[in-house]
Image (cartoon, rainbow, N blue to C red):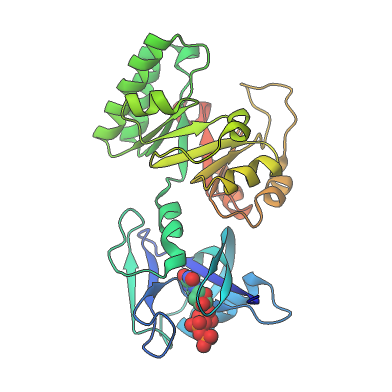
Amino acid sequence: MMKRVEVAAGVIFRRDGRFLLGQRAPDTFYAGYWEFPGGKVEPGESPADALIRELDEELGIRVQGVRPWITREHRYEHAHVRLHFFEVAEWEGELHDHVHSALSWERVEAPEVGPMLPANGPILKALRLPRWMGITHAAEIGVQRQLAQLDAALAGGLRLVQVREPGMPMPELRAFAGEVVKRAHACGASVVVNGSVELAAEVGADGVHLPAAQLGALARRPELEWVGASCHTRAELERAAELGLDYAVLGAVQPTATHPGQPVLGWERFAELVRGLPMPVLALGGLRQNDVECARTAGAHGIAAIRASWDQS
Ligand SMILES: Nc1nc2c([nH]c(=O)n2[C@H]2C[C@H](O)[C@@H](COP(=O)(O)OP(=O)(O)OP(=O)(O)O)O2)c(=O)[nH]1
């Protein structure tokens, strides 16, 4: 059996939101392929420390802090690697590359260089997942009011909407979901429909969001672009990973108006639960815009919210 090699890699962001890729040099495996800067973890080192060292050695930049993001394993012909990806938002110094043939700053929506190292396809997809998910509650506030708030939120930059309307009768739900898709797509935003692959496909949504109870029953990942799930436990998160889902939503982190009295996780437990997962996780439950920093420090990709997505609009 091939020994597993631990690797730390960084998604280094620039102020304009672009991230850095490097092209592998001629004398390496997969020469000419593109990768995230980073390298092997040395004995006794944590992956975070290894990344800080590698970015100094490879690129000459000093990193103030790294945020855990996702972890993926891949078996190459030459090695079985476990890649610990971190986000690097705070760094200083001028880039002086010592190891790559070229560097390129790419847009998360559509990276242009290629080919990428084979392990990195899912990483680029994860980067495309918006950092904020707005969850609808039209059954509570009324369809017209929800649609008006949706328009305002889309104009304000919302790029991912989950249609979640337990209790709304089917003909009304179909019409509402179709309207959300139409308005979201006009603004370049994506829509996932809670609970029904059929309805998601019927209204032209981009994906489906599975309630935790559906995770156990599902034999394989439905074939839609985005498939995610609501999770509350490590076992549910691992099931979501096993099915190859694109993201999970984990909560409740804090007390919420929707589920009063429900036990809450807090950020420490959240961080423990998401450690080492191969897909991005959005934090849910009583969170607002000013919780984004805490969420990302705890390993969240971003935030999913009902109230905070619509209130300010
Ligand atoms: N740095 C980095 N490595 C990646 C990414 N994706 C991916 O599969 N890998 C793999 C390629 C390598 O097998 C390993 C990185 O190790 P490395 O860069 O220190 O080593 P290497 O194989 O280029 O060369 P060497 O040190 O063994 O001579 O992880 C990525 O995005 N960034």
The vertical placement of 78 against 218, above or below, is: below
Figure quadrant of residue 176: top left
Q: Residue 95: percent from the left, percent from the top?
A: 41, 80
Specify the farthest residue to the left: 186
Q: Nearer the viewer, residue 238 or 264?
A: 238
How many badges with numbers are in the image? Answer: 0
Figure quadrant of residue 267: top right
Looking at the rendered image, the quarter that the N terminus falls into is: bottom right
Q: Nearer the viewer, residue 224 or 140?
A: 224
Looking at the rendered image, the quarter that the C terminus falls into is: top left
Whether residue 142 sits left or right of residue 105 in the image: it is right
Q: Nearer the viewer, residue 189 or 201?
A: 201
- Residue at the image point whose x is 57% and y is 55% from the top: 278
- Residue at the image point whose x is 66% and y is 40% from the top: 236
The vertical placement of 18 against 173, above or below, is: below
Specify the farthest residue to the bottom: 27
Question: Can the viewer see residue 312?
Answer: no
The vertical placement of 56 against 65, above or below, is: below
Figure quadrant of residue 198: top left
Question: Can the viewer see residue 37?
Answer: yes
Q: Residue 91: percent from the left, percent from the top?
A: 50, 71
- Residue at the image point whose x is 28% and y is 34% from the top: 185
Whether residue 250 sits left or right of residue 34 in the image: it is right
- Residue at the image point whose x is 32% and y is 24% from the top: 203
Q: Residue 312: percent from the left, percent from the top?
A: 45, 29
Q: Nearer the viewer, residue 143 or 111?
A: 111
Q: Residue 27: percent from the left, percent from the top?
A: 40, 91
